[in-house]
Amino acid sequence: MRASLSTAFSLALVLVFAWTLYEAQGFRAQARLFPVAIGVAGLALALLHLVLELRHRGEPAGASDGAPAAADAGEPDEDELAETVPPEVRRRRTYAILGWVLAFSLATWLLGFPLAVPLMTLAYLRVGAGESARVSVIFAAVTGVVFYGLFVEVVRLPFDPGLLTSLLPI
């Protein structure tokens, strides 16, 4: 049953990405760039996953690629792993992830994407992941430069300035 749900989900993703590419053909060139880039990559990955699902659909669990099953390799399977993590730990982790998503959304609304991306990268790496200040600053700076260079300078996507940054006299 699980394989058929996974196959159906993969097929649904293929259809969504194909529809995205079809719809994007009517857009102006600049507006078409982003959905086509995402659509091509997403369609390729969804097709790959669908092919792998169909290829391994009839095989018993753990029989794919000739590799030993997880139990044979001494690794816990997904159900065993879920049972080893106490429910309160899973709940706390879920709330932490939700908090970071909400914090990123709030930062984007207040500061706009070009500022929120490097600042939230810095905050997550330093506070959420416990990385050193040096690593956090380097990764945040690289993320900010790549994001700004790719989306603002190359693709020229117009980002809203954010609530707080729109109030600045610049």
Image (spheres, grey):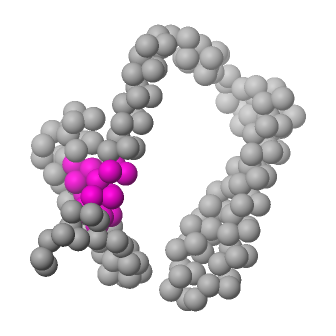
In the rendered image, the quadrant that contains the C terminus is bottom left
Q: Main secondary structure of the magenta part?
A: helix
Is 127 part of what is drawn in magenta? Answer: no
In the image, residue 158 sits, relative to residue 41, either above or below, namely: below
Q: Is residue 132 left or right of residue 152?
A: left
x, y percentage for residue 41? 60, 65
Residue 54 or residue 7, whichever sits in front: 7
Number of numbered discs visible in the structure rendering: 0
Judge left or right: residue 34 versus residue 44.
left
Judge by depth and name the residue closer to the eye, 98 or 156: 98
> Residue 21: x, y in percent?
68, 73
Relative image position of residue 162 (x, y in whole percent): 29, 65
Q: Which stretch appears magenta?
A: 104-122
Q: Measuring 68% from the left and 85% from the top, which residue is drawn there?
A: 26
In the displayed structure image, the side of residue 17 where residue 122 appears, left or right: left
Q: Is residue 64 above or below residue 36?
A: above
Q: Residue 93: in sight, yes or no? A: yes
Front-most of 77 and 16? Answer: 16
Q: Who's the residue at 69% across and 64% down the image?
A: 17
Q: Residue furthest bottom?
A: 28
Classify residue 116 by image quadrant.
Answer: bottom left
Q: Residue at x 30, y 75 (%)?
A: 149
Residue 111 highlighted magenta (yes or no): yes
Classify the position of the N terminus by image quarter: top right
Compared with residue 6, is residue 50 higher up or lower down, i.e. above or below? Answer: below
Q: Residue at x 18, y 54 (%)?
A: 138
Please tell me in which quadrant of the rendered image residue 47 appears. Answer: bottom right
Percent coordinates x, y for residue 93 in the rendering: 40, 26
Q: Is residue 139 visible?
A: no
